[in-house]
Image: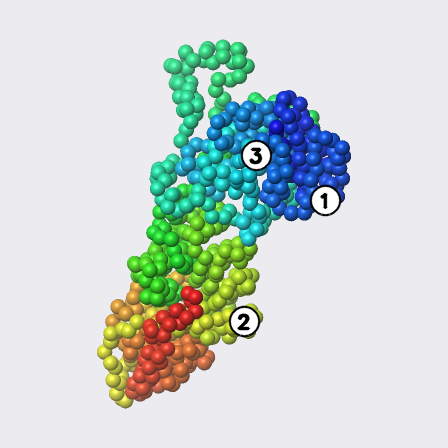
Amino acid sequence: MLSIIITAHNEGLMAHHTMLSIFRAIEVTNEKYEIIVHVDKGNDETIRYFSRYADDRRIRILQNDFGDLGMSRNFAIEKAKGEYISVLDADDLISKNYFVETMRILRGSDEEVIVHPNYCLSFEDLGGNFVLQTLGESISPEMDAILLFGRHRWIAAVSGRRETFLNTPYTKTENGFGHEDYTLNIKLTERGVLHKIAKDTTYFYRRKAFSLLQQSNSLHYAQPYHELFEIEKWQQFRSLEKDTIEPPKTWSQRLRDGYVKIRNNKFFNFFITPVAEVSKKITGKRVIQPTEMQVPASVLEEWMEISKIENQMFPTAEILATRLTEYNTDKIEELSQAYYKICKQVKHKPDFIFVVPWVVSGGADKVLLNYLNALEEIHPDWHVAVITTNNCVNEWEYRMPRNSFLVEFGKAAGNLDRSDRDTLLTRTLIQLQCSRIHVINSAEILEWVRLHQSLVKNQFDISASLFCYGILAHTDGRGIWDFADPYITRIYDLINVFYTDNTAVIDYLVKKEGFDKEKFRVHYQPTPQIAHQDHHYAQEPKKLNILWAGRISVQKNPKLLVRIAKRLDPEKVHIDAYGRFDEIERDGFQFPEGSGVLSYCGPFDDFSKLDLDKYDLFLHTSVIDGMPNIVLEAASAGLVTVAGDVGGIGDFVKNNKTGFLITDADNEECYVEVIDKIQQDPSMLNSMIKEAQKLLHERYAWEPFVEDIRGDFVT
């Protein structure tokens, strides 16, 4: 017996057209059948409509308040009496041959199979566009996994033995996981159940403005972990090593391609055209369809017939010419190619994940490397993944310790659109099976957390680093941007702890954003010891050699450096500036040429490799900063710092004790005054560098940093 399962919710009178199409399909089959209508949290109109079948012995009406499509279908299947099950929705329609062809496949198969319609014609309720999808059968374990990645290859309508559904039930939508139909077909594929197609059958799917599917999409439900997408399996896939994005062709497709080649050859076409014409007269069908999209004859015929039930469905010439498109789910997408590239980079199942925009030369990148090295010392048996979300050259990858590996998501994602990037990132994080994720300055992962809040809350342990706000380009230093606002403020409760390298950012975020101070931990970053010659400054005046080093960016304020240099005497002071141009280059900034005081010496990759012994002083001119590593490195090299009192610099630079802190941080006169004073009496630097290095050894040494990490970063 066949049990026809119809799940209903708020379809109202639209369900009547569904029932008419089902009755029409039942009339042409000899199957014994029952119809089970399961109304789950139905509205009044839907309940009222189905109540008319209360006395119909062919139909059982069940009601529940699951509010979940998967649970609704499982419940109805458990109540079914038939050996075979056909699952339908209460607002869609089916072709007349639907049950005849479906049961022919099910009864004729010795293997465990699941049956789908041949075609799905989706239409927008109350007019709009039409999409025709041709559904495919199982190809191979590898190709099925590739085609199912990120795309539901089939649809909700499915038929099979009741035992198959009981062994592989639908999943409940919860904890950020959803799309019960997609999940079912993945699980069936994992079990080795073959997907078959009921030839020439059509399912007419109604796209509504407010459906459970659209609700799932809007809530960004994800697929749970699946063996089908296991990283180790995908690393062995060979289909994705080629440049082609098409799956292997079936014999019928190969024969068709051969026919087209012959037909397009003028010589051979002379012989086959008469044969084709004769065949057409006999069978009424073309031997070969034109290369442009054509609606299969069976679909077109049933489309016209179903319009007698659903008036808006008639395939007018205008619809066929301008409002009908084709959707191909049997094509290897760039999304699958991107996931394959990611899988090839995964060396181990990670115990911890960092997500960063890049691994390049910069302060935040040094923080990352400090964390990686500390974790290697604390847990030498761990494997740590570093996921980069920007498409760039990760030039500092070579600095990562041996137990860490890089996953270049940004490169793999390439030009994928926003939705596909989200799908790819979600699948990657789920399949890595690591709940602990730390975010450092990646806007993409923070936006991902916002979109997948239920998933994150139940599956992941998220922490983040916050250092300082930044300056927007082309705003003359007045416009600011911040990872805290708008990103963190939207997901504040989902971040368990914030780490920072200075206390100033904590005060700033407590005051400006209302953050809780107790949610922060300060990790003073360790500074490597730089070999240098001890300076012994005499009291008499001397020409000062000053070093300025950093990114040439709005944040680092090289314009202030130029203003300072213009006020200094070239006979008494010289400044060398090192750094790589950042976004400020687009603002037209350039260092003045021929200046007697200031020389631009080009970019640098490693501060310790500069000729540090030739300098007497380090100058720092940032508009805003966290606790810049370069100030600590300067102290390690024996250089006292002159810096503005911005961000977390005051944590280390104590005015007239460990350095010179300029209160009016953008006033060049204040810097000039301090530099002139030092030039007249450089001996004042002797005590300051001793105090600076003492603080450096007490607070910014490797051992206390590792203990901080051991205490709260990994527990």
On the rendered structure, is 53 left or right of 347?
right
Q: Residue at x 72, y 44 (%)?
A: 43
Disc 2 residue type (three-letter): Asp
Question: Where does label 3 land, which residue?
Answer: 162
**Residue contact at pointers 2 and 3, CB within 8 angstroms:** no
Between label 1 and label 2, give the one nearer the viewer.
Answer: 1
Q: Is residue 122 above or below residue 63?
A: above
Give x and y (percent) for residue 65: 67, 47
On the rendered structure, is 10 left or right of 232?
right
Q: Is residue 241 above or below residue 643?
A: above
Give x and y (percent) for residue 463: 47, 63
Distance between the alpha carbons at the discs numbered 2 and 3? 54 Å
Between label 1 and label 3, give the one nearer the viewer.
Answer: 3
Give x and y (percent) for residue 1: 61, 28
Q: Residue at x 31, y 86 (%)?
A: 687
Q: Residue at x 28, y 75 (%)?
A: 637
Question: Where does label 1 land, which residue?
Answer: 43
Quadrant containing the C terminus is bottom left
Between label 2 and label 3, give the one nearer the viewer.
Answer: 3
The label shown at residue 516 is 2
